[in-house]
Image (spheres, rainbow, N blue to C red):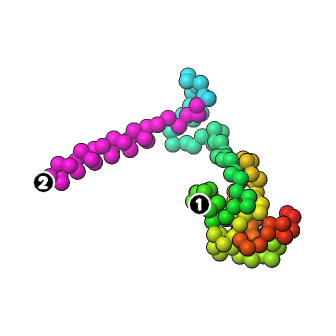
């Protein structure tokens, strides 16, 4: 009986929170308040207002590839390439360090995948051929 009494208010709170989150405006912040919607149909996507998502590339050069992968997050499409020119597969990024990145440090990420040129931790980036 006590579980039912506690569960009811918790479910109502969760439902209200999700309805409130769904009710957030999807209009761009720079749109005038009196602007008419781009489409009369609520179900039609507004491709004209689509903006590419961009993020800043952190400076991870010289860092551990595994830690950089964690820092970038699981949503980021990342590719590791052997910068030594030997074409080795990068099975465990934690065993590799970063020599180069595309895009470069502090540049905007506008295209995916993000590419890291890496060498084994015991190797030097200076020994890698230039890209």
Query: Going from the N terminus, do you reach mark 2 or mark 1 first?
Result: 2
User: Which picture quadrant has residue 127?
Assistant: bottom right
Please give the name of the residue rendered at 33% of the width and 46% of the height, measured from the top-left corner. 14
Please give the name of the residue rendered at 27% of the width and 47% of the height, measured from the top-left corner. 10
Q: Is residue 110 visible?
A: no
26 or 58: nearer the eye?
A: 58
Looking at the rendered image, the quarter that the C terminus falls into is bottom right
User: Which picture quadrant has residue 19?
Assistant: top left
Image x and y of residue 4, in percent = 17, 52
Residue position for label 1: 70
- Placement of 110 over or under 99, stated as above or below: above
Q: Which mark is residue 25?
A: none
Find out whether residue 5 is within the magenta segment. Answer: yes
Q: Residue furthest right?
A: 130
Determine whether, in the image, residue 65 is placed left or right of residue 119. left
Image x and y of residue 109, in percent = 70, 50
The secondary structure type at the circle numbered 2 is loop
Residue position for label 2: 1
Find out whether residue 85 is within the magenta segment. Answer: no
Q: CA distance from mark 2 to mark 1?
A: 45 Å
- Placement of 77 over or under 44, stated as above or below: below
Please give the name of the residue rendered at 60% of the width and 57% of the height, measured from the top-left corner. 71
Determine whether, in the image, residue 61 is placed left or right of residue 47. right
Asked if disc 2 and disc 1 are in contact, CB closer than 8 Å, the reply is: no
Magenta stretch: give its range: 1-29
Determine whether, in the image, residue 12 is placed left or right of residue 117. left
The secondary structure type at the circle numbered 1 is helix
Q: Tell us which disc is closer to us: 2 or 1.
A: 1
């Amino acid at each position: 009986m006590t579980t039912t009494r506690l569960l009811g208010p918790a479910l109502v709170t969760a439902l209200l929170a999700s309805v409130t989150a769904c009710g957030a405006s999807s209009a761009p912040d720079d749109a005038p308040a009196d602007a008419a919607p781009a489409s009369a149909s609520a179900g039609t996507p507004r491709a004209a207002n689509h903006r590419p998502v961009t993020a800043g590339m952190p400076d991870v050069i010289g860092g551990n590839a595994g830690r950089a992968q964690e820092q970038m997050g699981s949503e980021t499409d990342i590719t590791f390439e052997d910068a030594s020119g030997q074409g080795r597969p990068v099975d465990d990024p934690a065993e590799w360090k970063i020599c180069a990145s595309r895009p470069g440090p502090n540049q905007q990420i506008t295209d995916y995948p993000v590419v890291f040129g890496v060498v084994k931790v015991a190797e030097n980036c200076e020994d890698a051929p230039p890209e």
